[in-house]
Image (tube, grey):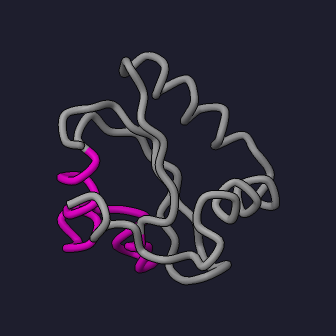
């Protein structure tokens, strides 16, 4: 799982605050968010649960997808999460 480009969504809780990000190492980045290593939005608002992710073949495609998702309405992001993870479970433990 690590060292593969990915787009991900973190949530503070079910239907809570959402954060869309991109990384080349999902396990490492999710761990950084969970442990408040990353300064900024996720630390400030307690957004730590990995609720959705999508793997990509290149960073370029992952970055393009992240930009598109950031432009999406919240309702669309919630629908995307619920198609993969209807219970809003924290997927971190499934990827480590």
- Name the quadrant containing residue 4: top left
Residue 33 among magenta residues: yes
Residue 42: x percent and y percent?
40, 67
Question: Residue drawn at (57%, 75%), measured in percent from left and top?
Answer: 88
- Placement of the N terminus among the 4 image quadrants: top left
Residue 95: x percent and y percent?
28, 58
Question: Residue drawn at (72%, 40%), measured in percent from left and top?
Answer: 71
Observer-nearest residue: 90 or 30?
Answer: 90
In the image, residue 53 sits, relative to residue 64, either above or below, namely: below
Observer-nearest residue: 11 or 83?
Answer: 83
In the image, residue 90 sits, relative to residue 63, either above or below, namely: below
- Placement of the C terminus among the 4 image quadrants: bottom left
Residue 39 among magenta residues: yes
Q: Is residue 86 left or right of residue 92?
A: right
Q: Which residues are magenta?
A: 26-49
In the image, residue 15 sits, relative to residue 92, either above or below, namely: below
Number of marks present in the image shown:
0
Q: Is residue 89 left or right of residue 95?
A: right
Q: Is residue 89 left or right of residue 80?
A: left
């Amino acid at each position: 799982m690590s060292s593969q480009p990915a787009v991900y969504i973190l949530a503070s809780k079910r239907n809570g605050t959402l954060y869309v990000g991109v990384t080349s190492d999902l396990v490492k980045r999710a761990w950084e968010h969970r442990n408040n290593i990353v300064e900024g939005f996720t630390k400030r608002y307690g957004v730590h649960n990995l609720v959705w992710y999508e793997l990509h073949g290149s960073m370029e495609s992952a970055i393009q997808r992240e930009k598109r998702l950031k432009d999406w309405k919240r309702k669309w992001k919630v629908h995307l999460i619920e198609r993969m993870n209807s219970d809003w479970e924290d997927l971190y433990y499934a990827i480590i």
